[in-house]
Amino acid sequence: MTLFKKIQQQFFSFGKRHSHPLPATEDTDSFALDDNFNFANIPDCPACGSDNVAIFAYGKPRLSKIIIEGFESGKIIPGGCMILKTTPKWHCYNCNRDFGRLL
């Protein structure tokens, strides 16, 4: 299985765990990461202060070189397609907490 297929499979399987999604809009892709994403802008965890933090990617991001590298390194985590009011933006690997909100 190619890397693209693995990433695509992860994206669509994670979205199924949510219920009561927000209605689909034309700007849903704005929640996906773009080519200008910068790993230097990832904040430290507010709970434990760790810098071992990843960002969730929602929707269908363009699979550019930087996005694929983020998936491979674990700095980007596929979050699925359903976006709720409680949808987290960041995940701390140190204390296993999600923080920040997209909406």
Image: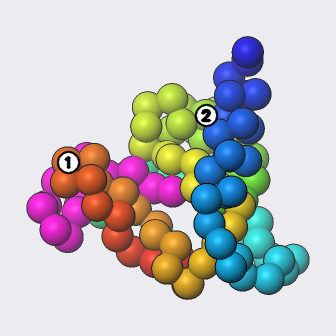
Helix, strand or loop for disc 1: loop
Give the x, y percent position of residue 57.
58, 55
Helix, strand or loop for disc 2: helix
Identity of the amino acid at label 2?
Ile
Which of 47/12 is in front? Answer: 12
Residue at x-position 39% and y-position 74%: 100
How far apart are labels 1 and 2 at the CA level? 23 Å
Which of 36/15 is in front? Answer: 15
| Circle 1 residue | 94
Give the x, y percent position of residue 49.
13, 61
Q: How crowded is the residue under tag 2: few (<14 C-alpha within 10 Å), some, or many (20+)?
A: some
Q: How crowded is the residue under tag 1: few (<14 C-alpha within 10 Å), some, or many (20+)?
A: some
Give the x, y percent position of residue 101.
46, 77
Which of 28/63 is in front? Answer: 28
Residue at x-position 12% and y-position 61%: 48
48 w.r.t. 6: above or below:
below
Residue 52 among those drawn in magenta: yes
29 w.r.t. 50: above or below:
below
**Could one spot residue 38 in this view of the protein?**
yes
**Could one spot residue 41 in this view of the protein?**
no
Residue at x-position 68% and y-position 46%: 13
**Of pointers 1 and 2, the one earlier in the residue sequence:** 2
**Left or right, residue 47 beside residue 11:** left
Q: Quadrant of the C terminus?
A: bottom right
Find the magenta span and give its range.
44-57
| Circle 2 residue | 68
**Left or right, residue 53 beside residue 48:** right
